[in-house]
Image (tube, rainbow, N blue to C red):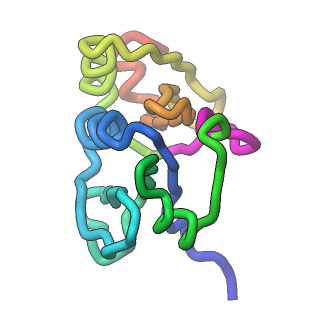
Amino acid sequence: MGLRKLGHYSIRTMDLEASRTFYTEVLELKEGFRPPFKFPGIWLYRGGDEADFGVVHIIGIDANDPAGLLAYLGDKSPESLQGTGAIDHVAFLADGLAEMRNKLESRSIPFTERTVPSLGLHQVFILDPSGVTIELNYAHQEAVALGLA
């Protein structure tokens, strides 16, 4: 018995709408089914993975009614909800490097990029609204076609 794949990652946020916008408009994940939990949130899916349980779960915090979240997942201080903590970053395989660079530039979203020597990957790093580092991995050929490598 072994691990088959990463199921999802979850982010707690004080600003559910900013996270919704980032993940649906910038990363183009699709909002989909979410069980009727007693706290706000959204489940986001890649195209074609609807049979799974989503790739990103956004957990909203309702400051006026935190009981459902506290009962289900426990408490975390709002000050701890920034960045990735001990996890350095979350990575996706991607395509469409030119389109992503244009989208990030048009939205004034800062990014850094680099090519990984000998792996054939060109990486783009961005931060989500909660300060979580997202790594997007593109085929090296896409970077070459844009004159980036």
| Rendering coords of residue 50 (x, y %) | 27, 70
Q: Residue at x 45, y 40 (%)?
A: 14
| Rendering coords of residue 58 (x, y %) | 42, 52
| Rendering coords of residue 126 (x, y %) | 48, 26
Q: Residue at x 46, y 36 (%)?
A: 136
Q: Is residue 50 left or right of residue 7?
A: left
Say how many tags the image has.
0
Which of the 4 image quadrants contains residue 15? top left
Q: Nearer the viewer, residue 109 or 15?
A: 15
Q: Residue at x 23, y 36 (%)?
A: 25
Q: Is residue 49 left or right of residue 119?
A: left
Q: Which residues are magenta?
A: 81-91
Q: Nearer the viewer, residue 29 or 37?
A: 37
Q: Residue at x 63, y 64 (%)?
A: 74
Which of the 4 image quadrants contains residue 90? top right
Q: Nearer the viewer, residue 140 or 30?
A: 30
Q: Is residue 58 visible?
A: no
Magenta run includes residue 60: no
Which of the 4 image quadrants contains residue 51? bottom left
Magenta run includes residue 84: yes
Extreme residue toward the right, this view? 86
Q: Is residue 28 left or right of residue 67?
A: left
Quarter occupied by the N terminus: bottom right
Extreme residue toward the front, this view? 64
Magenta: predominant secondary structure element?
A: loop
Q: Is residue 97 visible?
A: yes
